[in-house]
Amino acid sequence: MRRTDSTIRRGYAGRLPLVSVAVLVSACTIAGAPRVATPELRTLDLGGYSGSPLTAPPDAGETYGRLMESVRMAEAVVSPRAVDPALSRISAIPVPSPTEAVGILADATRSTLTAHGMLAGFSIGGTDDPTGMPKIDATGIPESGPIRSVRITVLRMRDNMAAIDAAREIDAFDFAVNRDNVTVRFPDYFATYGHWRPSVPTMAATLAHGPYVVSLFITNQTTDRAAMRALATATFDAELPRLDAFTPTTPEALSALPLDPGGMLARLLPAEPGQWPYPRLFQDEYQLIAGWGGPRRATGVVYGPIVADLRINRPGDTARIPVEAVAIADSAQLLRFPDAVAARQALRRLSEPGATRSLAAPPDGVPDAVCLRGFGVNSQAGDHDYTCLVLDGRYLALVSGPTEQAVHRMAAAQYAVLVTGR
């Protein structure tokens, strides 16, 4: 295992403790004025947790500032689903340094990104591959048959000129990997570069837009150059306006970014009782996939509505549920909605039994908790068999554990944290 300031790399990053919980708190009316009923928490089995919210550290500091800005940049990157609803399997990850860009971009670009002062970045990939990640062999050919995908990576450089130089060099390094690569032109965009191989159904396209580099990696069912170029053009058209609407943090203010925007992480059950979930990245560096970078995830972070929406809404859902933010601490998650009605709708959607999951017994003393056995409820669950969902007002928490007893204790503790932190 090798650890940097904010990144831990493992042979398999997803096997971490997880907890899921869902609970809805009811209100009662007392003569005079309505007030929320205070639940009895003393009888709950909290499994060693205090049941009280944690206190957030003051700010990101030098260690976490770029990672926090990268998390903010999730709001600057369009979801591939918005470009093509068929690209419904999503992978989203912060890219806070040139090291984390390796795998998503060619290894040779690390020195280029460093030289041009990369400050932060974010990457979202979407695919119609049922596994959620295209498998690309060493020659660049998809291993799992004809699939379509696009990965959108936005990296912030120190200034506009640095972005132009970085975009050109990123394409040049990747172009040089294989002598069969052919240039693809995008005359409608400034400082844009692309290439493709006539025998391989992939395409890369990179442009500079202000201080940002936008890099696309596309896979297709065939080597149809026009189809891949059309997907790249549609993606650029959707991405650039979102990038223009984003307000970046000045370099000197990065260290002052909050670690817990909106107090979300303080309301979420930590993996270790009493220990603040500092932000980290986990990456499987032994399964690097061209353009995707291998399985990755972030913990100790709070995303805005772009990533939160990906957790709740899927193409084909009869109605979209509005959601404001999602906090992730190891294997637990907390979603915040505009109101309690939307939160309850999300609880119902996420707690529906399916082919790979079934209802399990709820924990004692936790109102309206819903627990399930099986996979597919919480994408952070790893190897854990049980997930509970806990609803309190406009907050919906998901916690997971290896046994029914463990997840019941986590659910009770999560419920107590939400109630105490009102």
Image (spheres, helix red, strand yellow):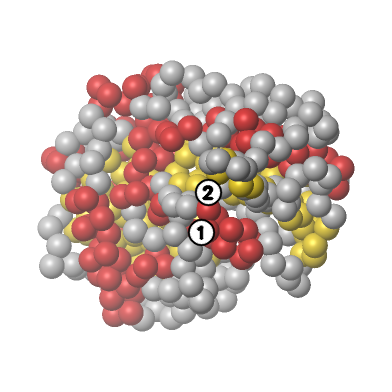
How far from the left and from the top, in percent, is residue 89?
A: 53, 65
Amino acid at dot 2: Arg
How far from the left and from the top, in percent, is residue 80?
A: 40, 64
Q: Quadrant of the C terminus?
A: top right
Residue that carries the numbered disc 1 in the rendered image: 342
Residue that carries the numbered disc 2 in the rendered image: 394
Query: How many C-alpha atoms fall within 10 Å of the one at disc 1: few (<14), some, or many (≥20)?
Result: many
Residue closer to the observer: 316 or 92: 316
Disc 1, SS:
helix
Q: Is residue 351 left or right of residue 59?
A: right
Q: Is residue 244 above or below residue 8?
A: below
Residue closer to the observer: 362 or 167: 362
Residues at marks 1 and 2, CA–CA distance in whole angstroms: 7 Å
Q: Is residue 53 above or below residue 144?
A: above
Amino acid at dot 1: Ala
Residue closer to the observer: 298 or 225: 298
How far from the left and from the top, in percent, is residue 93?
A: 47, 47
Residue at x 72%, y 24% (from the top left corner): 50
Query: How many C-alpha atoms fall within 10 Å of the one at disc 2: few (<14), some, or many (≥20)?
Result: some
Residue at x 75%, y 32% (from the top left corner): 41
Q: Is residue 333 visible?
A: no
Residue at x 47%, y 52% (from the top left corner): 339
Residue at x 35%, y 22% (from the top left corner): 255
